[in-house]
Amino acid sequence: MSEKLRIFTYPDSVLKARAEPVANIDGDLQEVIESMGETMYDAPGIGLAANQVGLLKRILVYDLSPRGEGRKLCVLVNPEIVEGEGKIVHEEACLSVIDYSAEVSRHARIRVKGFDRHGSPVDLEAEDLLAVCLQHEIDHLNGVLYIDHISSLKRALYRKRLKKMLMKARNTDE
Ligand SMILES: [Zn+2]
């Protein structure tokens, strides 16, 4: 049975850590993948990296299917970007960065190599939203958040606002 996992949020240190390659693609991994999928759909989000659920393994899940067309959980294990070209600016948000979004510039087209959930090699080319999503998720596995790509001023303003939000939430809890 898969279970919903806790999503860690900025500035938790697990989001800053580099995830380790998966050595064995086995039954335990299938369970982790199902739980990550469930957590992503429940959130809801279009992508989730293992760091975000506190697991430092190079696994990511995503699903860009249009709403109402059913689910198609895509999985990449040990993904690496091997080529990137062009430029796309897209407004990004993240399940681990509460109440914020910002424009980020990334490669418009990438080529990614890795493995699927059964251990078969994957070699895919992505563009537009899929390219943005995969760069965002692979960044997570390297301990990088999309807000690391924005200006330090914008990031500082966000940190300040987040601090206030968290303090307010804490006060309401008491
Ligand atoms: Zn994210």
Image (cartoon, rainbow, N blue to C red):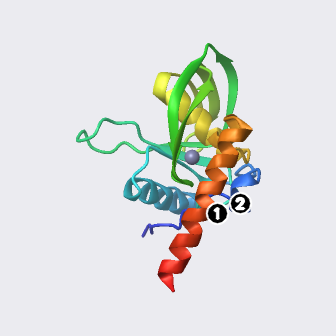
Instruction: Verify CB contact (< 8 Å) between mark 2 and mark 1.
Output: yes
Mark 2 Cα-neighbour bin, 10 Å: few <14, some 14–19, many ≥20: many
- Looking at the image, the residue that sits furthest to the bottom is 174
Q: Is residue 63 above or below residue 34?
A: above
Q: Secondary structure at mark 1?
A: loop
Residue 45 location in percent, x, y? 43, 48
Q: Secondary structure at mark 2?
A: helix
Residue kind at label 2, given as amino acid type: Val
Residue 7 location in percent, x, y? 54, 62
Which image quadrant is residue 125 in?
top right
| Residue depicted at x 70% and y 51% | 22
Q: Quadrant of the N terminus?
A: bottom left
| Residue depicted at x 70% and y 47% | 156
- Confirm or reject: label 1 Cβ below 8 Å from ligand 1: no
Q: Which residue is identified by label 2? A: 14
| Residue depicted at x 27% and y 43% | 70
Q: Which residue is identified by label 1? A: 54
Mark 1 Cα-neighbour bin, 10 Å: few <14, some 14–19, many ≥20: some
Mark pair 2, 1: CA separation: 6 Å
Question: In the picture provided, is 46 more to the left or to the right than 118?
Answer: left
Residue kind at label 1, given as amino acid type: Gly
- Looking at the image, the residue that sits furthest to the top is 86
Residue 127 location in percent, x, y? 51, 20
Q: Is residue 85 above or below residue 97?
A: above
Residue 26 in view? yes
Q: Earlier in the sequence, mark 2 or mark 1?
A: 2
Residue 118 in view? no
| Residue depicted at x 64% and y 63% | 54
Which image quadrant is residue 64 in?
top left
Residue 140 - label: none
Who is closer to the viewer here, 67 or 122? 67
